[in-house]
Image: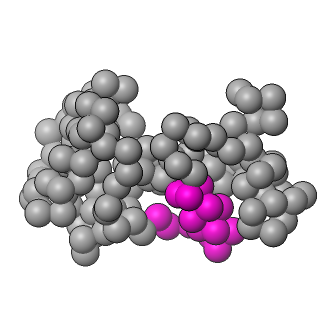
Amino acid sequence: MNSTQIETPIGKIEITEDNNTLIKLKYSDELQILKENKSYYLNKSIVQINEYFEGKRTSFDLKLNPGGTDFQIEVWKEVLKIPYGKTKTYLEIAKAIGDPGAARAVGNANNKNPIPILIPCHRVVGANGN
């Protein structure tokens, strides 16, 4: 497992990969000195995240392995389908996974997303658009 931190327009982010898959992006209040072993895959991740914030990238080609329940993983797979510049509601996600009564549970799963930005939870909104 390898980790590093980068400075982004939205603050510091710690990136963690394991066996060439991203497992976590974590917002951090302060830049910490990490004992790091920047792997090729971490470097590739840093480049793509920086390109995203520079407006040069609208999708990622990184392998993701978010740890979660079967339901959470199903929600995150659906969230990954939301195109850049578009949004979906919690209800739309719930319907897409075949459980229209699970809008609140979709929100909870979205809140537990261990790889924000790459799994674009920011593209999921409430029924009122917020």
Question: Does residue 126 appear in this view?
Answer: yes
In terms of depth relative to the viewer, which is nearer, 114 or 88?
88
The structure residue drawn at horizontal position 48% and vertical position 43%, both measured from the top left corner, is: 84
The structure residue drawn at horizontal position 78% and vertical position 58%, both measured from the top left corner, is: 94
Horizontally, residue 38 falls left or right of residue 119, namely left
In terms of depth relative to the viewer, which is nearer, 28 or 89?
89
The structure residue drawn at horizontal position 48% and vertical position 53%, both measured from the top left corner, is: 119
Residue 111 coordinates in the image, percent (x, y) = 62, 46
- List the single residue furthest toward the right: 101
- Location of the C terminus by quadrant is top right
Residue 1 coordinates in the image, percent (x, y) = 24, 67
Is residue 111 within the magenta segment? no
Question: Which quadrant would residue 29 be assigned to in this image?
Answer: top left
Horizontally, residue 39 falls left or right of residue 67, namely left
Horizontally, residue 92 falls left or right of residue 41, namely right
In terms of depth relative to the viewer, which is nearer, 113 or 120?
120
Q: Which residues are magenta?
A: 66-81
Vertical arrangement, residue 85 with respect to residue 96, above or below: above
Residue 50 coordinates in the image, percent (x, y) = 23, 38
Colour basis: one colour
Determine the main secondary structure of the stretch shown in magenta: helix
Vertical arrangement, residue 77 with respect to residue 117, above or below: below
Question: Does residue 14 appear in this view?
Answer: no
The structure residue drawn at horizontal position 69% and vertical position 68%, both measured from the top left corner, is: 71
Is residue 71 within the magenta segment? yes
Count how many numbered circles sit on residues in the image: 0
In terms of depth relative to the viewer, which is nearer, 31 or 20?
20
Residue 32 coordinates in the image, percent (x, y) = 20, 36
